[in-house]
Image (tube, coloured by chain):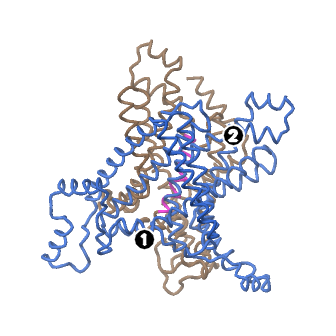
Chain colours: A brown, B blue
Amino acid sequence: MSLQENWFHEGLQRLKKNRLALFCAYFIGFICLVAIFAKNLTPYPFDQQNIDRILEGPSHQYWMGTDKLGRDLFSRIIYGSRMSMAVGVITAILSLVIGALFGAISGWFGGWVDAIMMRIVDIAYSIPSLVIMILVKVIFDSINIFSHPELRALAGTLIALSIVGWVTLARLVRGQVLQVKTSVYIEAGRALGLSQWGLLFRHVFPNIMGPIIVMLTFRIPANILFESFLSFIGLGLQPPYSSWGVLASDGADMLESYPHLILFPGAALFLTMMAFQLLGDGLRDAFDPKMKLQ
Amino acid sequence: MKIFSVALFWVNIIFGLSLVFCDLSLMYVPRVLLWSFWILFSGSVFYGILRQQLLGFFFKRVGASIIVIAIIASMTFLLLRFLPGGPFDEEKALPPIVKANIEKKYGLDQPLWKQYFNYMGGLLRGHLGYSYKYEGREVSAIIRDSFPVSFKLGFYALVLSFFIGIPLGLFAASRYGTRLDSGAMILAISGISLPSFLVAPILIYIFSFGWPLDIFAPSLYQWLLQNNLLLPPALWHSPAHYILPVVTLGIRPAAFIARLTRASVLDVIQADFVRTARSKGLSEKVVLYHHVLRNSLVPVLTYVGPLTAGILSGSFVVEVIFAIPGIAKYFVQSVFNRDYPLILALTILFSIMLILANLLVDILYKVVDPRMEVS
């Protein structure tokens, strides 16, 4: 175990030297805090309409102006961070759980299990993701699985993105497991009489955490982007909830007359995606110098 | 076997060349470019098949792909039936008899398994069925009208992303650790972080509306206007219309390729054979272009598969923004209309594109690096 702590410690030291990545980590932490406490931070309720003051530019009262229903854009962006981050993180974790289990079982057990599971991955890889995302989103939006209103608005998007996202992770994890499988400490564990599953979860997974974490960091912005794609084609979150993607694509229609409507959500989206990319780069350099750019 | 592939190779080259001359005679430059790339690409693929005796592999993969497509078609067929509502549920409900008649016309009154076998049988004979929504139109006709536009858009974006991405990555890697390197990489990262629905309005604002020239340099703006130098903000009539959509679609993949190329070049530059080449006294330029670049292109090739997928979904947004009469608009519409045959046909079409891209990449691997084991 001390070897692993050492590895983690060394990686952390390397990460701390990378100021840019560290700054991005703090920035993401800040956004996460904003997302968690969004309800307490907004100056106005995010869905409060003020019909007398529609489409106003930034002012003292409304810091980022108002939208076409007179809702405060600043509050909506703060609340949008909650939705966008929820989509990014939850989807990344969901697809990680599916993908990692699938890939690990496939790589670890090998033989015909591997052959069948890899055929499934091949098929999933050839499915055009956008079509499936649209179909799954429409299907799951019509079924209300959750009673919590925010989760209900998110459910379709979450499931649609996870169904598409697990495939790349499964491939990555399988490749990593195949590498680790032949190492001496696994053989030692086997000689000591550990069970297959015990080996897999106690010894294989901890050793491939590096690439998985890096991959996860890159998946989150990709998911946020996909969510904004879905919003753009009219399959966003169910109203009145909105994410940055929904806000930006709403604003894109009125760019010429009301540029603030796309400027602020677009900037929020852009900065967050950039922070995740830079942090991912930093993590990769720190924890897994040999890993190829994905 | 061998004669067959030799014949294929030459037929392909001659076919491509004849198209080039055809278009050259009409002075149609973009198409000449397109066909030239086609010759280069498919020529090298067939060359690879010839040299490496990959014909068996090729046919095996094609066979497997047909099975995969059949599975995907069946899955989508089933998934469609989970969509709430049917194709002929309208806001103003049809009289039951009318509805029953329409459903009978399209075979929707039959049991599901019968519908399934009808559809798959039609697929085998090349029938994609009739659209439910666009009355009297065959699905294949819809695809024939709109797909070439989308294909062109995607193809140009693909080419553009390689032409920007590889030089940029090489440039950054050759100046590793300098300000130029970090500048190029920050450019690439911003390219990745910008969603296309943000890029497109910015590009339109600058290149179609002439911002900020219209405010700060009105005379220059007038000159641009009079000489028709501002780019059209939408539609797909002439090559001038292609520029903004292709750039919008190409930016993200270009940024990805730049990062990939840089990482790969930095990897290869440490190899022993590069040191040997340098110690032989070869100039840095020769080492970089001859020894390093060729060897670092393999990981970049790996990316062509995901790249195609990305461009397929990215083209969707771009087509909507620029009002391009491509296939993308049918995607969402057909799902909302519950236009089953159209959704199925689009799914199958795009799976074929993905599978083809992956197959070509595997063959190109062999061409670039004959040591590569093709599975």
Picture quadrant where residue A262 is located: bottom right
Q: Amino acid at mark 1?
A: Pro
Note whether A241 is above or below B13 in the view shown.
below
x and y, in percent, of residue B44 in the image: 59, 44
- Between B298 and A182, the one nearer to me in the picture: B298
Predominant secondary structure, magenta span: helix
Q: Is residue B197 left or right of residue A16?
A: left
User: Over which residues does the magenta segment extend?
Assistant: A213-229
On the same chain, marks 1 and 2? The answer is: no
Which residue sits furthest left?
B97
- Between A48 and B168, the one nearer to me in the picture: B168
- Report the mark closest to the observer, 1 or 2: 2
Q: Decide: marks 1, 2 in contact (CB < 8 A)?
A: no
x and y, in percent, of residue A88 in the image: 50, 53
Which residue sits furthest right?
B281
Q: Which residue is mark 2?
A: B294
Crowding around mark 2 (Cα neighbors within 10 Å: few <14, some 14 to 19, many 20+) is: some
Q: Amino acid at mark 2?
A: Arg
Give the Cα distance between marks 1 and 2: 53 Å
Quick one: quadrant of the N terminus of chain A? top right
Q: Which subunit holds the residue at mark 2?
A: B
x and y, in percent, of residue A192 in the image: 44, 12
* Numbered circle sitting on residue A240: 1
Q: Secondary structure at mark 1?
A: loop
Crowding around mark 1 (Cα neighbors within 10 Å: few <14, some 14 to 19, many 20+) is: few
Q: Is residue A110 left or right of residue A176?
A: left
Q: Is residue B6 left or right of residue B59?
A: right
Q: Secondary structure at mark 2?
A: helix
Q: Which subunit holds the residue at mark 1?
A: A
Quick one: quadrant of the C terminus of chain A? top right
Q: Residue at x 32, y 72 (%)?
A: B137
Q: Residue at x 50, y 37 (%)?
A: A172
